[in-house]
Amino acid sequence: MKFLNRINLQSGYIIFSVFTLWLILILYTIDIGLNVRLFYNVIYFIGDACLILSPMWFLERKSRWYSVPVVWLISIYLMASAVYFKYWGNLLPLVSIFDSSNWNHFVFESAWHKINWRDVVIILVAAIYTVLSFVCKTKAPTKSSLPNKYRIIGFFGSIMMWMFAIFVDYMHMVRYTRWFNNEYATESTCNLDSYLNGRIEPSVIADSSSSFNSGLVWYLVRQFSYIRLSHNRLDLSKEQTEEIKEALSRQSATSALTDSVTACIMSDNKDKNLIFIIVESLNAEEIGHKIDERSITPILDSLINAQGTIAATFMMPQIKSGGSSDGQLIYNTGLLPVESGITVQQYDKNRYHSLAEILNKTHSAEFIVEDGILWNHRSTTKSFGYDKLFEMNDLKTAGLYRNENGADHAIFTFALRHLKDMPLPFYAEITTLSMHYPFDDKGIAGLENGLANINTEQRYQLSLKYFDSELGLFLNNLKRLGLYDNSIIIIASDHDTEYKVNIRGKRPICFIALNTGITKHITARTWQADVFPTILDIMGVDSTAGYRGLGHSLLSDSIPERGDDYWATVRGISDRIIRSDYFNRN
């Protein structure tokens, strides 16, 4: 600090502030596992720090505290984004921060367990900076003001430093384009309007908007643009409308059943109830896992191997930033979530062709353990075509939401009380919660006394064992009530989860359908979007009658292998359908 004071206290303090903010940005880059590259990350972040703190050059000495809240806001955001990245694999969208429904105990409990020492270092640097700022302020001489000439030089010098960083980014993109002939590379810093107008695939903008490819400032500018425009509807051109119609028609044709025997069996299921159990964080690899020679999922094991069961145990999740809500969206509508932002927060009031609408049962209801305000359930329940939503307040009124029983016991017990009185045939969707990260439901044996001596993998396995047991009780009670034999029961994971140390990446999830009249175990790679058309086939919906989603029925004669290129195109179609509210306008 003495060296900086010899320069000039105010200019020295600004340089120190810029260095602190730059260091925090570099620490964040290291925290999420990105390489620190001298001519890209480092220069971007120096330019960002200079630009963000450039107003300090025109502030008087007493007003220089401007930098302290700025450093803290950015540090807290970066720490939260680092935690979010470890859970979902991308950066924290600003739209998630400004949505009050995300500020709940589930989020905070999950985040707390993901914080590591690198996250703490980011906050520690901000704290040290604050202390040194206070010391510098109290011990500073009274005369340390900068002449206006130096203020102007410092301010415009900061702007030019940021512009130099943008120039470096541009030159990098030009070189990248020349080397790889990648046409969209040069668009990555200026393609927001193209994306919003539906002229490019969403994966392109997602790559540039979900990381600091061009520094923090551009990232925040893009994010605020998405917040401003996220509720604006995409106006489809005639060509785009025809492209969507053709894609939906082609998807229905390629996914249609051709086996007459299968079609005949499906007709027997038309008048059955549908009970769809969406399981929180059910990784397929843990089904059948043995501890001391005993499987932790004996119920699921027996169901997968039972007659009349259709099972897919190598299904790849396709959720985005919306987490569990994306899984529910995929299953209910057959669409994939939008690439930027959270679909149910931005497009919760859309018109969707949903399972509830297409099946058109006498009555339909959705059962959740959470508060209905979370993930806009109260709105999406209507958009997805359900007649009724039962949520946390209903469980509490019924005296069922108690820690000693566990969340899954509560939701299954509550659902049974209502299923027995529903008009037949009905459609019920039940979403479990006890396997939600950090796997700490106190109603589960082994977790009631805290988590101090149990690692994450053990907590997950205890939670899975508990769910398996509660599922068995639920199915037995359906038999007792005379509902089991006349119901198709679907069990599917909402998404995968990370529960093993140092193992990252997408993990397969599973789909299990009971009482279908067909026995089929699919071990080939399938996708979450395949569930929607598969359920339509199981329930005997005419495969040529209309909308069938964007997946491929698992009951068709052959299931094609589909890779990233295929799904990039499909995601583009889905993105335009959702952002244009296509079904409402057509």
Image (tube, rainbow, N blue to C red):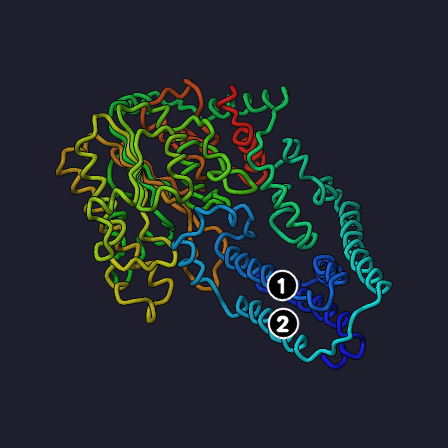
Residue 514 x/y as whole percent: 27, 36
State which tag comes first along the sequence, 1 or 2.
1
Q: CA distance from mark 1 to mark 2?
A: 9 Å
From the viewer's perspective, is 469 left or right of 544?
A: left
Q: Residue at x 67, y 39 (%)?
A: 192
The N terminus: image quadrant = bottom right
Residue located beneath label 2 in the image: 129
Q: Is residue 269 visible?
A: yes
Residue 157 x/y as whole percent: 82, 60
Local crowd at mark 1 within 10 Å, few (<14), some, or many (≥20)?
many
Circles 1 and 2, Cβ within 8 Å, touching? The answer is yes
Residue located beneath label 1 in the image: 71
Residue 188 x/y as whole percent: 70, 44
Q: What element does badge 1 sit on?
A: helix
| Placement of 246 over or under 389, stated as above or below | above
Amino acid type at circle 1 is Val
Outermost residue, front side: 142
Residue 14 x/y as whole percent: 73, 68
Outermost residue, left side: 480
